[in-house]
Protein backbone atom coordinates (compact mmCIF):
# COMPACT_ATOMS: atom_id res chain seq x y z
CA UNK A 1 0.00 0.00 0.00
CA UNK A 2 2.82 2.38 0.93
CA UNK A 3 4.57 1.58 -2.34
CA UNK A 4 1.40 2.27 -4.31
CA UNK A 5 0.89 5.55 -2.48
CA UNK A 6 4.52 6.51 -3.12
CA UNK A 7 4.19 5.59 -6.76
CA UNK A 8 1.01 7.66 -7.05
CA UNK A 9 2.67 10.66 -5.43
CA UNK A 10 5.69 10.39 -7.72
CA UNK A 11 3.46 10.17 -10.77
CA UNK A 12 1.46 13.18 -9.64
CA UNK A 13 4.64 15.17 -8.99
CA UNK A 14 6.06 14.23 -12.40
CA UNK A 15 2.83 15.30 -14.09
CA UNK A 16 2.92 18.65 -12.28
CA UNK A 17 6.55 19.33 -13.15
CA UNK A 18 6.21 18.40 -16.82
CA UNK A 19 3.06 20.50 -17.11
CA UNK A 20 4.73 23.66 -15.87
CA UNK A 21 6.42 24.69 -19.16
CA UNK A 22 3.17 24.20 -21.10
CA UNK A 23 1.17 26.17 -18.55
CA UNK A 24 3.78 28.93 -18.55
CA UNK A 25 3.82 29.09 -22.36
CA UNK A 26 0.04 29.27 -22.50
CA UNK A 27 0.01 32.03 -19.88
CA UNK A 28 2.74 33.98 -21.67
CA UNK A 29 1.06 33.62 -25.06
CA UNK A 30 -2.24 34.85 -23.64
CA UNK A 31 -0.54 37.85 -22.02
CA UNK A 32 1.28 38.81 -25.22
CA UNK A 33 -1.86 38.43 -27.31
CA UNK A 34 -3.66 40.72 -24.87
CA UNK A 35 -0.84 43.26 -25.16
CA UNK A 36 -1.13 43.15 -28.97
CA UNK A 37 -4.86 42.87 -29.73
CA UNK A 38 -4.28 43.37 -33.46
CA UNK A 39 -2.06 40.30 -33.71
CA UNK A 40 -3.24 36.79 -34.55
CA UNK A 41 -3.27 35.01 -31.19
CA UNK A 42 -2.48 31.68 -32.88
CA UNK A 43 0.67 33.15 -34.43
CA UNK A 44 1.73 34.56 -31.06
CA UNK A 45 1.15 31.12 -29.55
CA UNK A 46 3.38 29.49 -32.15
CA UNK A 47 6.09 32.08 -31.54
CA UNK A 48 6.00 31.46 -27.79
CA UNK A 49 6.13 27.70 -28.34
CA UNK A 50 9.14 28.09 -30.63
CA UNK A 51 10.80 30.27 -27.99
CA UNK A 52 10.23 27.73 -25.24
CA UNK A 53 11.52 24.97 -27.50
CA UNK A 54 14.68 26.94 -28.23
CA UNK A 55 15.32 27.43 -24.52
CA UNK A 56 14.67 23.73 -23.86
CA UNK A 57 17.30 22.90 -26.48
CA UNK A 58 19.92 24.94 -24.67
CA UNK A 59 19.45 28.54 -25.81
CA UNK A 60 19.86 30.98 -22.95
CA UNK A 61 16.58 32.51 -21.74
CA UNK A 62 15.64 35.59 -23.75
CA UNK A 63 14.18 38.93 -22.73
CA UNK A 64 12.77 39.99 -26.09
CA UNK A 65 10.73 38.25 -28.77
CA UNK A 66 9.93 39.77 -32.16
CA UNK A 67 7.08 38.31 -34.21
CA UNK A 68 6.51 39.02 -37.91
CA UNK A 69 3.28 37.84 -39.50
CA UNK A 70 3.96 37.76 -43.23
CA UNK A 71 0.41 36.60 -43.96
CA UNK A 72 -0.50 40.28 -43.55
CA UNK A 73 0.08 42.87 -46.30
CA UNK A 74 3.11 45.14 -46.16
CA UNK A 75 0.81 48.13 -45.68
CA UNK A 76 -0.13 46.82 -42.23
CA UNK A 77 1.99 46.91 -39.09
CA UNK A 78 2.92 43.24 -38.99
CA UNK A 79 5.96 43.34 -36.67
CA UNK A 80 5.59 43.14 -32.91
CA UNK A 81 8.44 43.25 -30.38
CA UNK A 82 7.65 42.04 -26.87
CA UNK A 83 9.37 42.30 -23.50
CA UNK A 84 8.85 38.76 -22.21
CA UNK A 85 9.65 39.50 -18.59
CA UNK A 86 7.23 42.41 -18.34
CA UNK A 87 4.84 40.82 -20.85
CA UNK A 88 4.40 44.10 -22.65
CA UNK A 89 4.52 45.35 -26.24
CA UNK A 90 7.55 47.49 -27.07
CA UNK A 91 7.12 48.06 -30.82
CA UNK A 92 4.37 47.56 -33.39
CA UNK A 93 5.74 48.46 -36.80
CA UNK A 94 5.75 48.14 -40.56
CA UNK A 95 8.34 45.68 -41.86
CA UNK A 96 9.53 44.93 -45.37
CA UNK A 97 9.77 41.59 -47.13
CA UNK A 98 12.10 40.55 -49.94
CA UNK A 99 11.48 41.84 -53.46
CA UNK A 100 11.10 38.29 -54.81
CA UNK A 101 8.65 37.32 -52.09
CA UNK A 102 5.83 39.33 -53.63
CA UNK A 103 4.30 42.76 -54.06
CA UNK A 104 2.09 43.95 -51.19
CA UNK A 105 1.59 40.36 -50.05
CA UNK A 106 4.52 38.05 -49.42
CA UNK A 107 3.79 34.68 -51.01
CA UNK A 108 7.22 33.22 -51.89
CA UNK A 109 9.95 32.38 -49.40
CA UNK A 110 13.47 31.12 -49.87
CA UNK A 111 16.62 30.15 -48.00
CA UNK A 112 18.80 30.39 -51.08
CA UNK A 113 21.65 32.83 -51.64
CA UNK A 114 20.79 35.72 -53.97
CA UNK A 115 17.11 34.75 -53.96
CA UNK A 116 16.18 38.23 -52.67
CA UNK A 117 13.32 36.58 -50.83
CA UNK A 118 12.29 36.43 -47.18
CA UNK A 119 12.97 33.32 -45.10
CA UNK A 120 10.64 31.81 -42.52
CA UNK A 121 11.28 30.45 -39.06
CA UNK A 122 13.03 31.21 -35.81
CA UNK A 123 16.13 33.42 -35.67
CA UNK A 124 18.54 34.30 -32.87
CA UNK A 125 19.98 37.79 -32.98
CA UNK A 126 23.69 38.53 -32.73
CA UNK A 127 25.61 41.79 -32.46
CA UNK A 128 24.75 45.14 -33.97
CA UNK A 129 27.07 46.87 -36.44
CA UNK A 130 27.20 49.80 -38.84
CA UNK A 131 27.17 48.78 -42.50
CA UNK A 132 25.96 49.98 -45.89
CA UNK A 133 22.41 50.21 -44.51
CA UNK A 134 23.50 52.06 -41.39
CA UNK A 135 22.96 50.64 -37.92
CA UNK A 136 22.02 46.99 -38.40
CA UNK A 137 21.56 43.73 -36.52
CA UNK A 138 22.99 40.38 -37.57
CA UNK A 139 20.83 37.28 -37.17
CA UNK A 140 21.41 33.54 -37.13
CA UNK A 141 18.73 31.37 -38.73
CA UNK A 142 18.02 28.37 -36.50
CA UNK A 143 15.95 26.27 -38.91
CA UNK A 144 17.83 24.03 -41.38
CA UNK A 145 16.43 24.28 -44.87
CA UNK A 146 14.32 27.33 -44.08
CA UNK A 147 16.56 30.12 -42.76
CA UNK A 148 19.95 28.67 -41.82
CA UNK A 149 21.62 30.58 -44.68
CA UNK A 150 20.55 33.89 -43.13
CA UNK A 151 24.00 34.86 -41.88
CA UNK A 152 25.70 34.08 -45.20
CA UNK A 153 22.92 35.96 -47.03
CA UNK A 154 23.42 38.97 -44.72
CA UNK A 155 19.79 38.87 -43.65
CA UNK A 156 19.78 41.59 -41.00
CA UNK A 157 17.42 44.06 -39.35
CA UNK A 158 18.10 47.59 -40.59
CA UNK A 159 16.36 50.86 -41.23
CA UNK A 160 15.23 51.73 -44.76
CA UNK A 161 13.51 54.88 -46.10
CA UNK A 162 11.24 52.75 -48.30
CA UNK A 163 9.52 51.44 -45.17
CA UNK A 164 7.11 54.35 -45.00
CA UNK A 165 3.38 54.84 -44.42
CA UNK A 166 3.44 57.58 -47.06
CA UNK A 167 4.86 55.24 -49.70
CA UNK A 168 2.31 52.62 -48.69
CA UNK A 169 -0.50 55.06 -49.47
CA UNK A 170 1.04 56.19 -52.74
CA UNK A 171 2.12 52.80 -54.12
CA UNK A 172 -0.25 50.40 -52.40
CA UNK A 173 2.73 48.75 -50.68
CA UNK A 174 5.92 49.72 -48.90
CA UNK A 175 9.29 49.20 -50.56
CA UNK A 176 10.92 45.79 -50.57
CA UNK A 177 14.31 44.61 -49.39
CA UNK A 178 16.75 41.95 -50.62
CA UNK A 179 15.29 39.62 -48.01
CA UNK A 180 15.89 41.61 -44.83
CA UNK A 181 13.14 42.56 -42.35
CA UNK A 182 13.77 46.29 -42.82
CA UNK A 183 11.97 48.84 -40.62
CA UNK A 184 11.42 52.60 -40.48
CA UNK A 185 14.68 54.54 -40.00
CA UNK A 186 13.12 56.58 -37.18
CA UNK A 187 12.79 53.54 -34.92
CA UNK A 188 15.54 51.28 -36.30
CA UNK A 189 18.21 52.15 -33.73
CA UNK A 190 15.94 51.76 -30.71
CA UNK A 191 14.38 48.57 -32.03
CA UNK A 192 17.77 47.02 -32.83
CA UNK A 193 19.12 47.88 -29.38
CA UNK A 194 16.11 46.17 -27.81
CA UNK A 195 16.69 43.02 -29.90
CA UNK A 196 20.46 42.58 -30.08
CA UNK A 197 22.67 39.97 -28.41
CA UNK A 198 20.75 36.73 -28.26
CA UNK A 199 17.08 37.64 -28.55
CA UNK A 200 14.64 35.75 -30.81
CA UNK A 201 12.69 36.67 -33.93
CA UNK A 202 9.87 34.49 -35.29
CA UNK A 203 9.07 34.94 -38.97
CA UNK A 204 5.64 33.44 -39.78
CA UNK A 205 3.64 32.55 -42.86
CA UNK A 206 1.10 29.70 -43.19
CA UNK A 207 3.45 27.62 -45.30
CA UNK A 208 2.44 23.97 -45.11
CA UNK A 209 5.91 22.45 -45.42
CA UNK A 210 7.39 24.69 -42.74
CA UNK A 211 4.45 24.23 -40.34
CA UNK A 212 4.67 20.46 -40.65
CA UNK A 213 8.44 20.07 -40.39
CA UNK A 214 9.76 22.90 -38.22
CA UNK A 215 11.35 21.41 -35.11
CA UNK A 216 10.48 24.59 -33.21
CA UNK A 217 6.84 24.86 -34.24
CA UNK A 218 6.36 21.14 -33.53
CA UNK A 219 8.48 20.95 -30.38
CA UNK A 220 7.50 17.95 -28.30
CA UNK A 221 4.16 17.49 -30.01
CA UNK A 222 2.48 16.41 -33.19
CA UNK A 223 2.18 18.75 -36.15
CA UNK A 224 0.85 22.22 -35.49
CA UNK A 225 -0.26 22.66 -39.10
CA UNK A 226 -3.79 21.70 -38.19
CA UNK A 227 -4.15 24.07 -35.23
CA UNK A 228 -7.41 25.95 -35.46
CA UNK A 229 -6.88 29.38 -36.95
CA UNK A 230 -3.51 28.57 -38.57
CA UNK A 231 -3.87 28.36 -42.32
CA UNK A 232 -1.75 26.25 -44.62
CA UNK A 233 -0.97 26.71 -48.28
CA UNK A 234 -1.80 24.10 -50.88
Image (tube, rainbow, N blue to C red):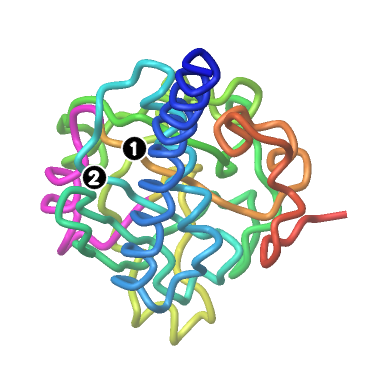
Asked whether 26 falls inside the magenta stretch, the response is no
Q: Quadrant of residue 70?
A: bottom right
Q: Quadrant of residue 166?
A: bottom left
Q: Is 212 on the left-hand or right-hand side of 66?
A: right
Asked whether 186 falls inside the magenta stretch, the response is yes
Q: Residue at x 38, y 39 (%)?
A: 20
Residue corresponding to mark 2: 64
Q: Is 116 on the left-hand or right-hand side of 166?
A: right
Q: Residues within 10 Å of mark 2 (few under 14, many from 20)?
A: many
Residue 204: percent from left, percent from top: 55, 51
Q: Residue at x 42, y 33 (%)?
A: 123
Q: Residues within 10 Å of mark 1 (few under 14, many from 20)?
A: many
Q: Is residue 46 above or below residue 110?
A: below
Q: Is 201 on the left-hand or right-hand side of 105?
A: left
Residue corresponding to mark 1: 200
Q: Main secondary structure of the magenta part?
A: helix
Amino acid sequence: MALNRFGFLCSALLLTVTSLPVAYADSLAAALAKAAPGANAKVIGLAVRATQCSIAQGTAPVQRLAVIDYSLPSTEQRLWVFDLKKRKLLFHELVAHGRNSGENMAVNFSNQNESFATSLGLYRTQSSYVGQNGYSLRMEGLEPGFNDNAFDRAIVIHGAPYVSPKLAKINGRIGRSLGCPAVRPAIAHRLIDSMKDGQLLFSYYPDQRWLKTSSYVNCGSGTMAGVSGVKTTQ
